[in-house]
Amino acid sequence: MRLSRSRTLAAVTVALALVAAACGSSSSSSSTGSSSGGGGSGGAMAATTDVQLAYNADMQVPDPDIFYEIEGNSLVTSVYEGLVRYKPSSTDIEPALAESFEVSPDGLTYTFKIRPNVKFHDGTPLDAAAAQGSFERRTDVNSAPAYMLADVASYATPDPMTFVVTLNKPVSAFLDYLAAPYGPKMVSPTVLKEQGGSDFAQTYLATHDAGTGPFTITDFQLGTKYVVTRFDGYWGPKPQVTSITYNILPDISTQRIKLESGDLSMIIHGLSTSDIVSLEGNKDFQVQRFPALFKTLVMVNPNRDYLSDPETRKAFLAVLDKEKITTEVYGEQASVSTQLYPAGELPDGLAMDDAPMDASKLEALADQFKGKTIDLAYSSDDPRNQRVADLYQTELQAAGITAQTRGIPIAQVFDLPNQKDTAPDILVSTVNPDAAHPDTWARIFMNTAGALNWLQCSVPAADTMMDKGLNTTDKAVVQSSYGEAGDDLVASGCFGTIADVKEVIVAKAGYGDFVHQLPTLFTVRFGDLTVG
């Protein structure tokens, strides 16, 4: 069994509270989203290759072995790269800093051929020894993302450009870990040697970088702004964007004003559906929509005596009009969820969460809830969650149930497992897995020991199937195991889904070749972006 996510995520919870807030060659860059509005090479593009972005809140330090948030993905993944990555808008994995890779039939040995002529930003060449040092640093730092290497038994470098990883047991998600935005990234051995100190260079990498990506950090002012600049020694095609400035602007209305005045180049998340529709009708802007591993999730608290019966919990979920909520809250920015997992993680037909709306089940229980007010909470990090909760409240009241909505800041949501007595009866949140593998969804949010199993629902049968699916080399067993786990979780009535939410970016007209990777939210590959 790998390291408990509840232990490895503890540092993330503290940080959030503080800020409050297979082998083959790499595919060529291409536009993978659907666009509308200005698009192309419209006249609104400023004569500059500096991209101005806004973050809703401070990110953690840009250290790739500590960073474990969504806000900040666009910076970290522009600066650091891993051995493999996801193909655009796909769950398939392709080489990145490894030019090829092989997996042994027993699923224990992963052999990577390191891409030649890659240099870190300090000029140090990438080789197998640097790859091993990068993997070892992740374990030494032992922050949240370290769980991805918990089952490594050994490393080897049989020649300067061959890196071999051996596991102590099969881990079906291992390549997905490496391809994830939070997966192990290559870090310069020179920086680790010269800046290592007593903390494995964490102090230095809190404001600097040691990556190989198309951009390098040139200014990092926590709470104010971050700047990355094009790395002209990059091994891949030279980016057209010369720099990216990330401004800290918590208010989305301010962001829109700055976008329309020309102070921002694009808004990468947070706009309401009405904002998107309005800007889409303006020829000076374009809207890019991408499929993403992003789902609106409802959790029902089994630790309340009045919600302890699975059939009662399922009645509370059955009252949801998923189609109406999806249409009114998200419009074209989402589709109705039919599976427990994010779309694309499992084949169609597995782990189905598509029961028709049936308010009669809850209406039959209404007398049991007379005089009681259901505490219906939502994570306030996404303003759309409030609208979802408001519509859900109306549906509950129509069924004879009194409910009161309230917002919970994301830092407090992360701490809900430690606040069992004060946790809400129902929680609405829009969340994402670490990677495209189903384990990084089910185990994080729904396993008994899952660190983000916020309302602490335990479904032992599902836990067993997750373990079976993780520790196998048979793809069919992986899919059937997580499918069965999903069926058990749906049957528990603890978890329901509403919508599969798309990634939406509104940008000035003139940018092109937007490339998006499914698990990497709130970003595109800025190294691929073209400037009209």
Image (spheres, rainbow, N blue to C red):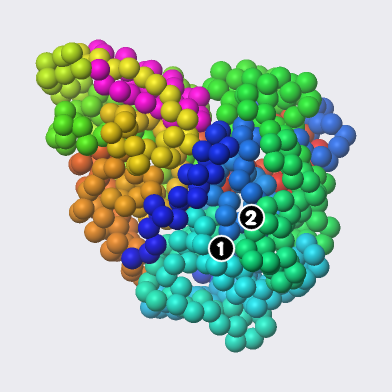
Disc number for residue 63:
2
Q: Nearer the viewer, residue 38 or 20?
A: 20
Magenta includes 376?
yes
Q: Nearer the viewer, mark 1 or mark 2?
A: 1
Q: Which residues are magenta?
A: 373-399
Q: Is residue 355 left or right of residue 431?
A: left
Judge whether residue 81 can be spotted in this image: no
Residue ID for mark 1: 141
Disc number for residue 433:
none
Q: Residues within 10 Å of mark 2 (few under 14, many from 20)?
A: many
Q: Is residue 96 above or below residue 117?
A: above
Image quarter of residue 500: top left
Image quarter of residue 192: bottom right
Provide residue 300's location: percent of width, then percent of height: 27, 33
Q: Nearer the viewer, residue 167 or 501?
A: 167
Residue positioned 64% across, 77% down in the render: 128
**Amino acid type of disc 1?**
Val
